[in-house]
Amino acid sequence: MLKSQDLSSRILSFSLRLAGIFAAQENCFQYLQQGELLPTLFGEAGPLGGAAWTAPTVRSGWVQGLRTLARHPSALRFLAACGAVDTIFSLQGDSSLFVASAAGQLLVHVLDLAMRGPAEGRRGPRARDWPACAQKIVCHIEDSLCSAATPQVTQALNVLTTVFGHCRGLWTQGLWVRLSPLVARLLEKDPVPASHSLVDLLLSVARSGPRGAAGGVGRSSSVLSSDRGLWETLAQTLSHLSPTQAGPLALGILKLQDCPQALRTQAFGILLQPLACVLEAAAQAPGTPGLLEGAAGDSMTVDTLLSSKSACVGLLCCALAHLGLLQPLPQRPSPWPQVPLLGAVVTILRLCSGSAAPTSDVGGRLCAILVGCGRVQRAALDFLGALSQGTGPQELVTQVFSILLEYLMSPESSSMVLKKAFQATLRWLLSSSKTPGCCDLDPHTQQFLRELLPVLQKRLCSPCWEVRDSGLEFLTQMTRQWGGRTGFRQALLASEVPELTRQLLRDPESYVRASAVTATGQLSGWGLRATPASPERPGAQQESLLGELLHILSTDSEGFPRRAAMQVCTEWLRDGRADVAEDPERFVAGVLQAASRDLDWEVRAQGLELALVFLEQLLGQRGSRCPYSVGLPETAPPGVLAQALQVLCRVQLFEFAFRALFDCDRPVAQKSCDLLLFLRAKAASCGSLQEAGDSPSVASVEATLQRWQAGEQGQPLGYLEPGAIVAVLRSVDLEGLRDTLAESSDHVEKSPQSLLQDVLAAVGVLGENEADCY
Amino acid sequence: MYCLSGHPTLPCNVLKFKSTTIMLDCGLDMTSTLNFLPLPLVQSPRLSNLPGWSLKDGNAFLDKELKECSGHVFVDSVPEFCLPETELIDLSTVDVILISNYHCMMALPYITEHTGFTGTVYATEPTVQIGRLLMEELVNFIERVPKAQSASLWKNKDIQRLLPSPLKDAVEVSTWRRCYTMQEVNSALSKIQLVGYSQKIELFGAVQVTPLSSGYALGSSNWIIQSHYEKVSYVSGSSLLTTHPQPMDQASLKNSDVLILTGLTQIPTANPDGMVGEFCSNLALTVRNGGNVLVPCYPSGVIYDLLECLYQYIDSAGLSSIPFYFISPVANSSLEFSQIFAEWLCHNKQTKVYLPEPPFPHAELIQTNKLKHYPSIHGDFSNDFRQPCVVFTGHPSLRFGDVVHFMELWGKSSLNTVIFTEPDFSYLEALAPYQPLAMKCIYCPIDTRLNFIQVSKLLKEVQPLHVVCPEQYAQPPPAQSHRMDLMIDCQPPAMSYRRAEVLALPFKRRYEKIEIMPELADSLVPMEIKPGVSLATVSAVLHTKDNKHVLQPPPRPAQPTGGKKRKRASDDIPDCKVLKPLLSGSIPVEQFVQTLEKHGFSDIKVEDTAKGHIVLLQEAETLIQIEEDSTHIICDNDEMLRVRLRDLVLKFLQKF
């Protein structure tokens, strides 16, 4: 096939990868070697350097083939003999990013393979003992590190990052001893080349020791624990890089579990520096306690902040995001400067809203840069939300709530900023009400709620749908947490929020309708319904909420509101809501009827969830899902089961479940399978039920099911007797179906059989069809 | 430039440029009316029973003129307006008035009818038509509530000192004037000549003026005023937002020597989008609660955009059944006019016209009876009036117009809301005579004019050499002195002006354009002195008329009569002296020295100086000073030697 003149690049690429797969086994490799096939593919006689080589897919196939092939010593010898390593070097700078990246990884793989082997234990730090192939690669990395061209340095650093991230041999310690001086020398250049990659490498090296936060598992000994040089290099790097570049490194260092305190202090200082500058610049009076005790704002950070709007925004956003990531970690610096951080973030938000009035020159310029800046507002609100996990003096907490209210009220807040402000408000409200032993809201929170609800009301009337949506989401979350608290209930019922929420069920935007459905469901669950419309309010309708939900379920043109309605219905059934509990059978029948016709698979899946809840209410809970729990099997009395089945037949649950069993969407089918299995188990535990094993109706049901499975879903099942149901449940291979459904959706395409079919197809009709190379 | 107005968004400046006198806008500062009591359309017992104001010592001689309401003192008289400065320059010398938008022409009748003005006014058609509507509405509002009393005692300087603020601090009260009449309006408008965007208008041959779209309102313009070698851009009330008017033409403002920048947004901290959101939310909340909404507004401008927003919003907010009323003597004309000025609209609206559809959706609101318009509260309106409702009506100052009636009617209920959208008046001052007030007040000023960020981008784009602006733009607002972002930041710093100030604009007058008559041009013999540059001498008569300069062939020299030249006193033909040839080129010193040596000069020394060289002929005690633009031969009374040396120098130069 390879001799064919007009071989397409995709076929060639496929052949290279296929050969690699075959040659991964040493005996197979030997066999292919006898036929000189491998040099023809991977050596100079192959596509290398030819016309086909210009296609990235061929180069990619070449790299991937070798990557799979290189698994045994013979492969190493082959690589050396055919000069593949030099080609890999050149491919590191390939124009295709995929090829370049794969080449770098292949290089690491080959180095690792060369360094492993029978004598691995002895291959410690002494580099002169290393095999020739490894020597060659390391020399290449050394040359690249010394290169004046930044791309070369980047390649070398990326390769080393992969080495220390993935290779677990003792030799990595030797490699670091050998290369660290070259890496340290990069810091002497100004600007430091490839700073991102350098940061990645240093963090990768630091994590590769047992002290690392993520690494160390299964390591026999520390690679670098004795190397104090690493910490020094990290400290040097922190001080050499610009504030923006040093941020990710500082965060990485602080995430390490075992690292010298001095370095942690330095790293934390880097992250705090921009906020410290802001705090200092905005301080009303000199001598206000800052974020970094005793240290004035670093001039480099101040310069960056003031150099341009983009630099200032970039640095502040990074600092806020990094601190936000650090905040919840157990290894975050201690003591955590909660109070000054809160002060700083409140100051930033004030600068952004224009409500701060800094007196200093730097403060004035920062104000001019930051005012109205949505990116910083979003980052600051996120971080403010994260800080709600800690506490602060009441005065500062009052400031936090006041700035949050300012943002929620401001017409200048964009929809995204408002969303973040709602999220941060929720977190602060919830954290402030955690006071132990207190069952209701404290006066401060109560007061805040009184001011907040009119704002929420206004936001629910916003012409911008995103704002209405965020407002409803906030309301839902608040109600979920505080629905039972008297203070919240009183404030909410005194406002027009419940009425507005109900009106939003008819919003023109589907997302808003969905959120309104969820919010209404939540409010209603806590008995927080809109006050009945008074006669002088025209337009207010008094129809039942349940009716409205069923209306949405059966008529809404968009999926989101229907999904939300289905979820609310399920919750209501589960919680035994009064108007549902009056006649659950009618309720379930209505909902299932609407769900069965729905085109949205999530609605159908949610319908099955509701059916399951109904089943559990009729027949008792499903068995504990914990495999280790000890419990006696529950059995329902035969009378109960028969009665229950009658009910299920009446609400046409089986028609819905059996149709769902053959649903074209796998999650629906899986859920239905689980439901029917549960029902069958219940029926089995109660053997005395009269089965109608051979009755004509069973046969007709089975025939209908077969047609449904074949895709002909037009015919209905009709009314079924409970006995027939039990018989059908036993006759259908539900376990087999469950196993099939448990396979991933592309399991057929991924099977070896499919690969073979493709190969055969490619060989058989070469020239007509191209092989499907996935 | 003579600055006649202190209001940055209602400018009135006079520019003397190239022997023309151009007035740029004539805005009328109506904030003076806030000092007056409202003119109720229907007898208001509350207003008529307000107590008179008396001095601290109990002296009540002003109690007929001044009334007290909730701690504020108001003049009980026909409202008066603060005119542009009329004493700084003789306004009869103004040649033309350029109008940039309909808000900036409200003082026009005062200028054209009472100052001896005899020139022409230039404005676009929508500016004139909508300006007429605004003036008509103003006159109507004031004339239909005749007030017997005209207070003037309080204006006495000695008395004014004793009054409480803000009356005490009101400026130039003696120049405040009552509103003009419709007759004066018509006469003023008859002096307007209509222009179109990019139309070039010649003023006395000296200056060309061109209006450009400014994107702020229907027909709103910026103006280019240029001579052949100088360009002044006048930017007044411009917007970069996508609203209904044609977008702003920025490119034509490039390469200006001076850019006069006025009419920026009055609320630089408020983004119009956010404000429209506030407007809609508050409107919906009020109406849902069964309350009425009052929107004091002008009959044209932002109202079109608000109606468009509401058109999209009312259905989604469930407000379809709520009536919207637009009450103004010119409501009908305003709504109709907006639909016919298609060429002045933004692209989207223009394309609608070809469908054909009305460019503004308020046509549909009217058709479906959701929006109804009336000339006043009397008549049909009282039959159709249904609550809760939304009323758009004027005047935004709350001192006259139908709005006064609604303030009195709805002010007592907290269910109702007044929403201020026009930025021209302080809403707290506007509300002062209605206190105590139960109705809710929402301030969402919508000002689409340029903010400082946009100005900064605009200036970077058009790069004028100098920027001139009102003093309010050259420093942060007094209440927010730390907001360095709320001022014009440019290099060199903007030159600022204030009312009654005269500013010398930084022009460097360097060239004038002169035409050459064809027959004269024919006679020229150009000589190429270096590639691409030719020179020719020309003898001609410079003829200047209407600021145009023309070179005409000189008259033939009179035939010599005898050996002596005669000169007659009556003969105004200039003397044509025998012309010396003009010289050009440079003298290469080394070659010159060689030539001198060839001609027998010895002992030559050359010294380099800062400007050139000095060639010393030591033996002859002579000095030749060669500089870039002059050569001097300094010798001691030896004319022969000087002429010899001169001829040697001339050999190196070209003559023509």
Image (tube, coloured by chain):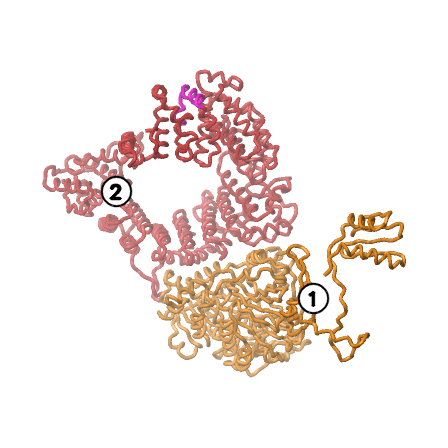
The C terminus of chain B - image quarter = bottom right
The local secondary structure at tag 2 comes to: loop
Q: What residue is at 21 percent from the left and 43 percent from the top?
A: A659
Callout 2: chain:
A
The chain whose colour is orange is B
Q: Decide whether residue A74 is among the magenta residues.
A: yes
The local secondary structure at tag 1 comes to: loop
Q: Is residue A29 above or below residue B187?
A: above
Number of other residues with Cα within 10 Å of mark 1, as a class: few under 14, some 14 to 19, many 20 or more: some
Residue B457 location, x and y as percent?
A: 56, 56
The answer, for residue A447, to whether it is visible in the render is no
Q: Is residue B587 above or below residue B510?
A: above
Q: Nearer the viewer, mark 2 or mark 1?
A: 1
Q: Amino acid at mark 2?
A: Cys
Name the residue that disc number 1 marks: B538
The chain whose colour is red is A
Spatial CA distance of label 2 from label 1 is 95 Å
Tell me which secondary structure the magenta stretch mostly adopts: helix
Name the residue that disc number 2 marks: A664
Q: What residue is at 50 percent from the left and 69 percent from the top?
A: B219
The span shown in magenta is A66-82
Residue A409 location, x and y as percent?
A: 49, 56
